[in-house]
Image (cartoon, rainbow, N blue to C red):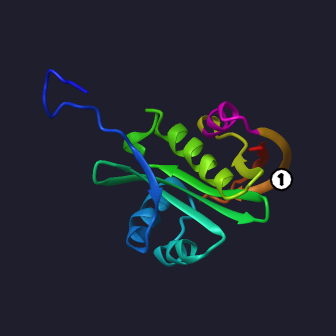
Amino acid sequence: MMTWFPGRERAVPVVEPASPNDAARLAALHGASFHRGWGEGEFETMIAERNTLVQRLRLRSNVIGFAVSRIAADEAEILSIAIDAGYRGQGFSRNLLLTHLGHLAGRGVRTVFLEVEENNQPARRLYDRAGFAVVGRRERYYREAGGLELNALVMRRNLS
């Protein structure tokens, strides 16, 4: 590809397997994105598990996001997906999610589930656009810092 301004090429994000060396960064991203963040040790454990797919989203040398799913037979559950706040709204989450789903399909997964907070409109739009459909609701599933309990929607997407 020819560019008129060398060094000005747009960086392309890369979805790749996370390694134990990423655990601290993934924990920091999770803690900044969710009320109850997972610790570095939890990420180290998930990365080591054979039935868990942990992928990072790297832009140049920076890890700016991740996706984690647990696989059981031909089903998977997306446990968490997060993008660094400074990179949200730029389409990175869609790229990460769709690539992650492709890797799950490559492992024989036919159906993917997830829970999303009912009022989290950006996440709901992401999942709706990626082909997920609401199949259930969990009352008071999430708890905010102030003790407020929030409902979750259970969503499903077929990959086959």
| For residue 74, side relative to residue 61 (left or right) | right
Q: Position of residue 11 (x, y in %)?
A: 30, 38
Q: Classify 10 Å Cα crowding around label 1: few (below 14), some (14-19), many (20 and above).
A: few
Q: Residue at x 52, y 45 (%)?
A: 96
Dominant SS type (magenta): helix
Q: Which of 14 and 35 is in front in this view?
A: 14
Q: What element carries label 1?
A: strand
The answer to whether residue 76 is magenta is no
Q: Residue at x 40, y 70 (%)?
A: 24
Quadrant where the N terminus sits is top left
Within the image, what quadrant is residue 13 found in? top left
Q: Where is residue 4 in the image (x, y as percent from the top left)?
A: 15, 21
Q: Say above or below: 1 vs 159.
A: above
Magenta segment: 123-132
The residue pinned by badge 1 equals 139
Q: Position of residue 115 (x, y in %)?
A: 73, 51
Q: Nearer the viewer, residue 121 or 54?
A: 54
* Residue type, mark 1 in image: Glu
